[in-house]
Amino acid sequence: MKIVASLCLLVCAGAMICEPARAQEAASLPQARAAAAAWLALVDAGNYSASWQEAAGLFQSAVSPQAWASAVQSARSPLGALQSREVESATYTRTLPGAPDGEYIVIKYASKFAGKANAVETVTPLKEKNGAWRVSGYYVR
């Protein structure tokens, strides 16, 4: 009985510790989604230079403005105009393959373009040291 009571206390204590973390994650989601939406609006408008400027430092250190403009134009041009975009999922994580530990939210969008009816866009905002959420990654398939 003592073991069961001790186990219950450990589980309850763990839940109390995790609860503030979950609350922090939930509070971060609207901020990260807003940052992603504003950044995507720049990309949708073809304003690749501004999208690079508004991206996270991690993003900027990985790709030059010119290389970004070339890559995103190559990826997006064949798709045509955006027709719709809806959030499919948003997942909070502290680790991503090939990226430093931090606070990330991986947002997947079900997107429809004039030239591709069933696209998936993945946008990954990162919480920077100053507390601002900025996009650290983008992928469309």
Image (cartoon, grey):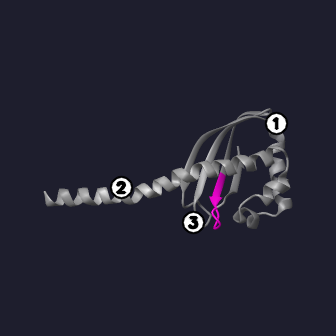
Q: Earlier in the sequence, mark 2 or mark 3?
A: 2
Disc 2 vs disc 1: Cβ atoms closer than 8 Å?
no
What's the magenta region? 124-131
Q: Residue at x 74, y 50 (%)?
A: 39
Q: Residue at x 35, y 55 (%)?
A: 15
**Looking at the rendering, in which quadrant would you find the C terminus?**
top right
Residue 21 pos. (x, y %)? 46, 58
Residue 109 falls left or right of residue 55: left
Identify the residue position indicated by label 3 in the image: 101
Judging by the rendered image, the residue that carries numbered circle 1 is 81
C-alpha separation, residue under disc 2 versus residue under disc 3: 23 Å
**Is residue 12 inside the magenta stretch?**
no
Q: Quadrant of the N terminus?
A: bottom left
Alpha carbon of mark 2 to alpha carbon of mark 1: how far?
46 Å
Residue at the spot of label 2: 15
Residue 130 location, x and y as percent? 65, 66
Residue 53, image quadrant:
bottom right
Amino acid at pointer 3 = Asp
Report the amino acid beneath label 1: Ala
User: Looking at the picture, how far across and down is residue 75, in whole percent?
Assistant: 79, 47
Discs 2/1, front: 2
| SS category of the residue bearing label 1 | loop
Label 1 or label 3, whichever comes before in sequence order: 1
Q: Please tell me whether residue 90 is drawn above or below residue 63 in the rendered image.
A: above
Tell me if mark 3 has few (under 14), some (14-19) or many (20+) residues whose alpha carbon lies within 10 angstroms of its own.
few
Residue 28 falls left or right of residue 59: left
Q: As rendered, which of 19 and 125 lies closer to the eye?
A: 19
